[in-house]
Image (spheres, rainbow, N blue to C red):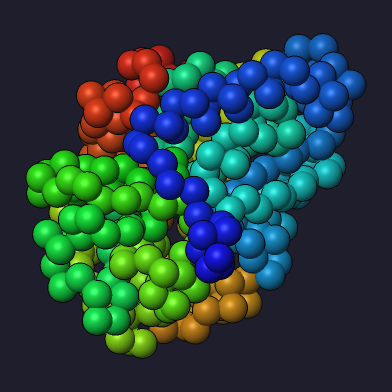
Amino acid sequence: MGKLAQKKTSFKLSTILALISLVLLAAACGKAEADPTGGQEAGKIPSVLRIGYIGSTKLNLPGGAEGWGFYTGITKQELQKYGITDVQFVGFPSGPDLSESLISGRIDIGSLGDTPAVLAKSAGAPSKLITLNAANSNAFILAKKGGPASLAELKGKKLSVKKGSYMHRYVAGLLKEQGIKDVQLIHLLDEDADAALVRGEVDAIATTEVRGLKMIPQGYPVLDEALKDHPDLVGGSITVVSESYLKKFPDLPKVWNDLRVKALEDLQTKEEDYYAFLVENTGNSLELVRKTSAISRIQKETFTDKGLQQLEAAKDFLVSDKLAENDFSIEEWIAK
């Protein structure tokens, strides 16, 4: 049996609902055990703040203004004024994994793609939206060498996509728009997907901008680029907080966003230092981080009209395509 046969999980798009339901059930069973604050009363700010992000970095920090603020000490120093003396970062391979930990109380805040956050919220996750970090998260569909030469040729083929991610919504929307059916979607995490494409065990992969730009020079054909070919299907990055933590620190949204803006204003005066931080943190080249993590992509405003419209559109698609379990109000989701 091949390696892909041992690892792959074929799925229909509707199975994301079962995934979120299981997450909520697990949270109900284990939340008390996961809370290191010992059930502190509402209104008392815990000394520990646990922050989740997507990826695995050398410094165990996210990028963007948030990561820069903690890297330089700007944010950590300010949080100490509120009694937060221990900040812990946890990297996750995907948004659904991060959502599970937020629901179960293992982390307090999480930055992730809009799609997994919406899917979790639609299934009843007790979270509040505090920031739209960035819009226009790009993605690629890459084919294996000698494989499909167009999107239409994906019919009857195997396409790898990380289930529940913003790329999942991109793929679902793209296939629906193009009228392409009978595509076997296979759930693989990033490194497994790359390896499967190299070995020819899948016909194509949906991948992030960073990973795509690394593979394209190796000769893997681009079948589609979200930002260029289908900008209405790009993703966004958002930050959510658990409702239980928000009860203990009601001012968190304002404090968090004020510190994010302060860190952004600082890094804008130290561009070379910021990009050097990203190179050290990710291990990627300076050229790549400048292209994929340009400072101009970081939003200063907590919420923009464009960002909210994009988030609303993502939610509406997921609901109408029956990927999201229930509709809900974006306005009511926002922490006040």
Which residue is more in the foreground, 133 or 138? 138
| x, y percent for residue 264 | 49, 56
- For residue 292, what is the image quadrant? bottom left
Q: Which residue is drawn at 60% across and 41% down?
A: 98
Q: Is residue 148 visible?
A: yes
Q: Is 93 left or right of 149, judged from the image as shown?
A: right
| x, y percent for residue 45 | 78, 25
Q: Can you say whether 169 is above or below 243 in the image? A: below
Q: Is 213 left or right of 281, judged from the image as shown?
A: left
Query: In this view, which residue lies farthest toward the bottom?
Result: 218
Query: In this view, which residue lies farthest toward the top?
Result: 41
- For residue 251, what is the image quadrant? top right
Q: Which residue is drawn at 57% across and 19% down?
A: 126
Q: Can you say whether 255 is above or below 123 in the image? A: below
Which residue is more in the foreground, 301 or 278? 278
Q: Is residue 206 visible?
A: no
Query: In this view, which residue lies farthest toward the right?
Result: 38
Q: Which residue is drawn at 35% across and 50% down?
A: 185
Q: Is 270 left or right of 246, judged from the image as shown?
A: left
Which residue is more in the foreground, 215 or 213? 215
Q: Which residue is drawn at 49% across and 73% down?
A: 195
| x, y percent for residue 250 | 63, 20
- For residue 30, what is the image quadrant? top right
Q: Is 200 left or right of 178, judged from the image as shown?
A: right
- Of the 4 image quadrants, the one containing the N terminus is bottom right
| x, y percent for residue 310 | 26, 38
Which residue is more in the foreground, 321 or 36? 321
The number of discs equals 0
